[in-house]
Image (cartoon, helix red, strand yellow):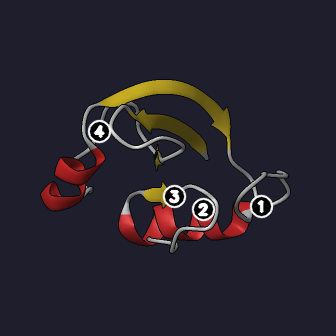
Amino acid sequence: MQCYVYRSRRKQQTYLFLPQRDDFSQVPVSLLKLFGEAEFSFEFELSSERKMVLAEASEVKRNIQENGFYLQLPPGEEKAC
């Protein structure tokens, strides 16, 4: 699965992972308001075997498939979606 990552300009170390570039249609409006302006960071191939720093790739993939997005918060903050 191709994955597109956006960083929040409002909240440091907060990232939104999407399955399609620039398609925020599955992200709740309230979350987008809190997230602020989204800046495209990079894209990569997301597979269950991929090593990620702050999350398990399988968890990210599952959340994207179930919810249409994955929100990564800074270390030490409560996980969301």
Q: Amino acid at mark 3?
A: Leu
Crowding near the residue tagged with mark 4, few <14, some 14–19, many ≥20 C-alpha atoms within 10 Å: few
Crowding near the residue tagged with mark 1, few <14, some 14–19, many ≥20 C-alpha atoms within 10 Å: few
Q: CA distance from mark 1 to mark 4?
A: 23 Å
- Which residue was labeled with disc 1? 48
Q: CA distance from mark 1 to mark 2?
A: 7 Å
Number of numbered discs on residues: 4
* Location of residue 80 in the rendering, given as x and y in whole percent from the top left corner: 45, 71
Residue at horizontal 26%, vertical 32%?
Answer: 37
Height in image: 17 above or below 48? Answer: above
Crowding near the residue tagged with mark 2, few <14, some 14–19, many ≥20 C-alpha atoms within 10 Å: many
Q: CA distance from mark 1 to mark 3?
A: 20 Å
Instruction: Identify the mark nearer the N-term, 1 or 2.
Output: 1
* Location of residue 15 in the rendering, given as x and y in whole percent from the top left corner: 49, 45
Q: CA distance from mark 4 to mark 2?
A: 16 Å
Which of pointers 4 and 3 indicates the residue nearer the eye? 3
**Residue 73, label in figure:** 3
Task: Please state, as top left, top right, bottom left or bottom right, where the C terminus lies in the image.
Answer: bottom left
- Which residue was labeled with disc 4? 23
Please report contact status of discs 1 and 2: CB closer than 8 Å, yes or no: yes
Please report contact status of discs 4 and 3: CB closer than 8 Å, yes or no: no
Q: Amino acid at mark 4?
A: Asp
Q: CA distance from mark 4 to mark 3?
A: 20 Å
